[in-house]
């Protein structure tokens, strides 16, 4: 081999050794997840929420503690409530408790698979479930303490209320459980996808946000909540949906390529 050829070969080998071998695909990051703790928290949270629903008649106030309604709430109710309140109520249940969870599982699976990280979907959904049950527990406790009269009940005359009788659910308007759950689902799923570094994380955010807003709107249309009920539910659900993954499930530090031991190869050239 000529001297020039040998030097070119050496230069090529050095260039190959110094080049950083990066893959075309993004590498999904691991997040902090301790099954013994996180599964327990989710299970206890779910038990508390189920218990609060089962004991609603016992825990709910016998009469409204928060009975007065401001002008903005009255005007927004008048503008948005549907003639068929039952239809709006049914649609909101379907969107919040069926469509949104199914969409979140499907979108997260697609985003993870797109980055060859399908095995992480189980943990992703565990974080979303944990966040959502915590948000639901916060909502359940607040409803009982606030004792706010629902708009549909508030609009009744005294005679109509007497004929209908008092129900435990009549004074559990603040704040909206549907809005809380919907925004906790949407934002926790989006936050987890972002923390993971999924390239399709914006798709998760953009697809779930309209469903969450639709749920909040439909609760007003169904005459089940005042605007301030759903607004606070949106804020609480979204706040916990971002905070819990970011604080308790932050990404694990990735090993720096500079910290890895450098192995050198000994090359012998015959001149």
Image (cartoon, rainbow, N blue to C red):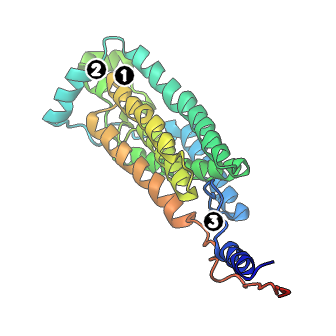
Which sits earlier in the primary sequence, circle 3 or circle 1?
3
Residues packed near mark 1 inside 10 Å, few (<14), some (14 to 19) or many (20 plus): many
Report the residue at 55% width, 28% height from top. Answer: 99
Q: Secondary structure at mark 3?
A: loop
Whether residue 48 can be seen here:
no
Which sits earlier in the primary sequence, circle 2 or circle 1?
2
Pick whichever, 137 or 168, lies toward us.
137
* Residue 176 position by quadrant: top left
Mark whose residue sits in front, 3 or 1: 3
Q: Position of residue 116 (x, y in %)?
A: 69, 49
Residue 240 numbered mark, or none? none
Where 182 falls versus 217 (above or below)?
below
Q: Position of residue 240 (x, y in %)?
A: 45, 54
Q: Which residue is disc 3 drawn over?
A: 32
Q: Position of residue 226 (x, y in %)?
A: 28, 33
Q: Which residue is disc 1 drawn over?
A: 222
Pick whichever, 3 or 226, lies toward us.
3
Which sits earlier in the primary sequence, circle 2 or circle 3?
3
For the C terminus, give its image quadrant. bottom right
Q: Is disc 2 in contact with disc 3, using a CB cutoff of under 8 Å?
A: no
Q: Secondary structure at mark 2?
A: loop
Report the residue at 53% width, 33% height from top. Answer: 100
Separation (CA) of disc 2 from disc 1: 6 Å
Q: Secondary structure at mark 1?
A: loop
Q: Which residue is disc 2 drawn over?
A: 81
Q: Is disc 3 in contact with disc 1, using a CB cutoff of under 8 Å?
A: no
Left or right of 52 in this view: 8 = right
Q: Position of residue 175 (x, y in %)?
A: 36, 42
Separation (CA) of disc 2 from disc 3: 43 Å
Q: Is disc 2 in contact with disc 1, using a CB cutoff of under 8 Å?
A: yes
């Amino acid at each position: 081999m000529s001297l020039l050829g040998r030097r070119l070969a050496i230069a090529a080998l050095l260039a190959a050794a110094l080049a950083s071998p990066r893959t075309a695909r993004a590498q999904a990051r691991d997040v902090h997840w301790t099954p013994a703790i996180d599964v327990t928290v989710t299970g206890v949270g779910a038990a508390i929420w189920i218990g609060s629903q089962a004991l609603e008649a016992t825990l709910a106030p016998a009469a409204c503690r928060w009975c007065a309604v401001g002008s903005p709430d009255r005007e927004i109710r008048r503008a948005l409530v549907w003639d068929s309140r039952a239809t709006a109520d049914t649609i909101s249940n379907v969107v919040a408790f069926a469509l949104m969870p199914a969409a979140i599982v499907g979108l997260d699976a697609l985003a993870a698979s797109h980055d060859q990280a399908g095995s992480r979907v189980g943990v992703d959904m565990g974080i979303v479930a944990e966040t959502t049950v915590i948000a639901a527990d916060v909502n359940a406790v607040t409803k009982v303490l606030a004792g706010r009269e629902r708009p549909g009940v508030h609009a009744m005359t005294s005679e109509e209320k007497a004929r209908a009788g008092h129900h435990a659910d009549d004074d559990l308007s603040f704040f909206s459980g549907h809005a809380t759950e919907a925004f906790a689902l949407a934002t926790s799923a989006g936050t987890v996808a972002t923390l993971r570094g999924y390239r399709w994380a914006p798709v998760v955010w953009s697809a779930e946000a309209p469903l969450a807003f639709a749920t909040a709107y439909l609760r007003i249309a169904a005459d089940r909540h005042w605007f301030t009920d759903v607004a606070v539910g949106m804020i609480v659900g979204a706040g916990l949906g971002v905070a819990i993954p970011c604080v308790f499930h932050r990404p694990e530090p990735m090993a720096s390529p500079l910290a890895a031991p450098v192995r050198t190869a000994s090359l012998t050239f015959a001149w």
